[in-house]
């Protein structure tokens, strides 16, 4: 009996598709499931994680808890997952910087593709380009004209090196043929504070921290980075609409499991998370945060990651952006 139990455990840990792995997948889950959020509590990633965890508990019939593992632009939390047993009891919600980091950093403690099993997308969000209302920049065209007149003098703040805002700015500059100076901060709040204090020319961030300031008249939006207008702010046009049709740099959030997690467990998690993302209450909550609830198959998510790896590798190479 002890030998059978040992074989059962080893088979699960190795992710083997044999009899024991199938049996484990059929009974999954039998204990609490952990969602790793690679950010501090309170941010967009944490809000999505906790919103989904609450309903996922009902879907899976086991408690789903969120564990914050912040630091190093998601690398710390992602490494924790990469080293976790591939049994479905540890998963992570990563943003699109997961695909960016592979090229941005000289060395990572994991491979963005090889060490993970994609489960599903959970949401997507545009990025807002905003300026201080006192700025002479009122439109995207103003921004481009002023940057052309003063190459490298205009500055933009973001939540940090390697953040989605950072690379969205790099892509914008490359697409427009201009030079902008990136000013990284340790988080969205100080980046926003710098813009409110007129210490930078503009800032690029997800909608939640910016929209209240925009509605209060304390910030002026230039445009959204997404291909379509955001349901959270339908009055703000996209940058593509404003004369740059090839520009798109949305932020996405998706769930990963460790590599070699049995396919049947990945499918079980996919079905449960997709059901939660489609829940009316969850959709309303996420939409209120400027996040568009979306889901997909594991295969579709894998293709999205592969496409983003190629896209951002090209942008990073052309721009020379690098974080050591």
Image (cartoon, helix red, strand yellow):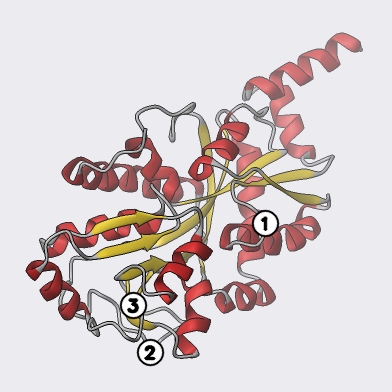
Mark whose residue sits in front, 3 or 1: 3
**Which of the two labelled residues, at mark 2 and mark 1, occupies the earlier sequence position?**
1
Q: What numbered label is drawn on residue 214?
A: none
The residue lying at 33 percent from left, 77 percent from top is 131
Farthest residue, direction left: 149
Element marked by disc 2: loop
Residue nearer the viewer, 163 or 54: 163
Mark 3 / mark 1, whichever is N-terminal:
1
Question: Can residue 233 be seen?
Answer: yes
Label 1: which residue?
A: 41
Q: Residues within 10 Å of mark 1 (few under 14, many from 20)?
A: some
User: Mark 2: few, some, or many residues within 10 Å (few <14, many ≥20)?
Assistant: few
Tell whether 208 sits left or right of 126: right
Expressed as whole percent of the image width and height from the top left, the position of residue 321 reads 26, 43
Q: Is residue 226 visible?
A: no
Which residue is denoted by mark 3 in the rendering?
131
Residue at image position (34%, 56%) is 183
Q: Position of residue 46 (x, y in %)?
A: 64, 58
**Regarding mark 3 in the picture, which secondary structure is present there?**
strand
Q: CA distance from mark 3 to mark 1?
A: 27 Å
Quick check: 213 above or below 324? below
Total numbered badges shown on the rendered structure: 3
Quarter of the picture holding the C terminus: top left
Element type where label 1 sits in the image? loop
Which-is-in-front pick, marks 2 and 1?
1
- State the separation of the CA atoms marked 2 and 3: 16 Å
Q: Position of residue 278 (x, y in %)?
A: 61, 69
Numbered badge on residue 235: 2
Q: Nearer the viewer, residue 203 or 172?
A: 203
Judged left or right of residue 214, residue 199 is left
Q: Report the residue at 51% width, 40% height from top.
A: 72
Q: CA distance from mark 2 to mark 1?
A: 30 Å
């Amino acid at each position: 009996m002890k030998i059978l139990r040992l074989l059962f455990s080893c088979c699960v840990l190795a992710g083997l598709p044999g009899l024991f792995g199938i049996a484990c997948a059929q009974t999954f889950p039998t204990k609490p499931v952990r969602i790793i959020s690679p950010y501090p509590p309170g941010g967009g990633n944490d809000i999505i994680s906790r919103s989904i965890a609450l309903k996922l508990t009902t879907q899976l019939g086991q408690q789903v808890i969120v564990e914050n593992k912040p630091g190093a632009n998601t690398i710390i939390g992602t490494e924790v997952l990469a080293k976790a047993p591939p049994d479905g009891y540890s998963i992570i919600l990563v943003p699109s910087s997961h695909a960016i980091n592979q090229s941005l950093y000289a060395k990572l403690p994991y491979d963005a593709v090889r060490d993970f099993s994609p489960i599903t997308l959970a949401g997507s969000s545009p990025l807002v380009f905003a300026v201080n209302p006192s700025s002479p920049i009122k439109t995207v065209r103003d921004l481009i004209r002023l940057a052309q007149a003063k190459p490298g003098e205009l500055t933009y703040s973001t939540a940090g090196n390697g953040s989605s805002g950072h690379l969205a700015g790099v892509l914008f500059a490359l697409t427009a043929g201009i030079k902008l100076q990136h000013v990284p901060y340790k988080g969205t709040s100080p980046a926003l504070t710098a813009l409110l204090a007129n210490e930078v020319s503009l800032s690029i961030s997800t909608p939640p921290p910016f929209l209240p300031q925009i509605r209060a008249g304390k910030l002026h939006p230039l445009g959204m980075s997404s291909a379509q207008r955001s349901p959270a702010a339908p009055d703000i046009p996209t940058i593509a609409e404003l004369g740059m049709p090839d520009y798109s740099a949305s932020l996405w959030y998706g769930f990963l499991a460790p590599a070699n997690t049995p396919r049947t467990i990945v499918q079980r998690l996919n079905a449960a998370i997709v059901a939660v993302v489609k829940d009316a209450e969850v959709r309303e909550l996420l939409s209120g945060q400027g996040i568009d609830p979306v889901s997909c198959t594991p295969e579709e998510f894998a293709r999205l990651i592969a496409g983003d790896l190629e896209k951002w590798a090209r942008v990073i190479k052309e721009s020379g952006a690098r974080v050591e």
